[in-house]
Amino acid sequence: MGKTTKKILGTVFGLVVLLSAGVLVKVHLETRKMSSADTGKIVGGVYAVQDSYVNLFLIKAHDTYVAIDAGNDAGRIQGELRRLQIDPEKVAAIFLTHSDPDHIAACSLFSKAVIYLSRAEEQMVNGQTARFLFLKNKLNYPHKLLEDNQIVTISGMEIKGISTPGHTPGSMCFLVNGTYLFTGDSMGLKGGKVTQFNKIFNMDSVAQASSIGRLAGVPGVEYIFTSHYGYTRFNQTAFGNWKE
Ligand SMILES: [Zn+2]
């Protein structure tokens, strides 16, 4: 290898290291700004479970629960569920909003649950599409695939999947019983107003903006629950500028 080639390779390597360090610092700072909801009952059988900067949600249906996402740290979540006196074995289904590790890693805790993921997100867990550079998501559990607008009924509870690409290509929101909208990382919330999710974490922020426009048109929503920025009671101004 010639001296010049070595020099160029060294510079490129240095730049990549610097860039990656910059991204890591930014990710760390933005994660610290997140404001997940405290563990507890919120409304009508909906429970927030806090796992550091991320939430999963449980909705009670008769004697079972449906989970929206699974969270990250199984040990920590087990502790929170004990406080709520909820047995993880009673969770009959997990609806994953997308495949990032902080939303799926704790699937292991819910051994009886059927796992649902949108068909468009399958590319993120089968090695086809990378999440960031060469990093890929994984889902090491059997799962069922959902189409856009598909409705699944569990113990009388209706869960409808709404495709909202942007954060990841197969991000999906879930409308439960026509009133509770779980948005995962498809939006943020600030002072009760819908915002775009932090762009540094999105694979396609333009697509996400139009997905939020789609959500603004969903009728009947009474509450909006996000994964990292808490929840809000729906009101006419919640979607503000996103309404067309
Ligand atoms: Zn997330």
Image: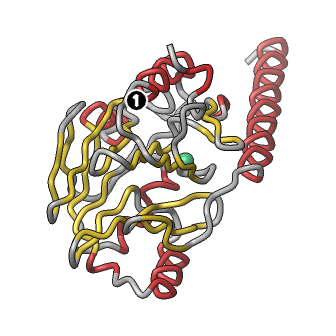
Place of residue 149 in the rendered image (x, y in percent of width and height, measured from the top left): 22, 32
For the point 20% across and 42% down, which residue is it? 145
Residue at 41 percent of width and 45 percent of height: 181
* 146 sits left or right of 165 in the view: left
User: Percent position (x, y) of residue 198?
Assistant: 66, 34
Mark 1 sits near ligand 1, with its Cβ under 8 Å away: no
Above or below residue 83? Residue 126 is above
**Above or below: residue 114 compared with residue 174:** below
Q: Is residue 99 visible?
A: no
The image shows residue 213 at horizontal and vertical percentages of 47, 21
Look at label 1 and name its amino acid: Thr
Q: Is residue 87 left or right of residue 151?
A: right
The residue under label 1 is: 164
Do we see residue 211 in this rendering? yes
Q: Quadrant of the N terminus?
A: top right
Residue 132: percent from the left, percent from the top?
55, 33
**Residue 120 image-quadrant placement:** top left
Q: Quadrant of residue 195?
A: top right
Using residue 24 as the reference point, say whether residue 162 is left or right of it: left
What secondary structure is found at the residue carrying circle 1?
A: loop
* Image point (38%, 83%), residue name: 86
Closer-to-camera residue (180/6): 180
Residue at screen point 34% across, 84% down: 87
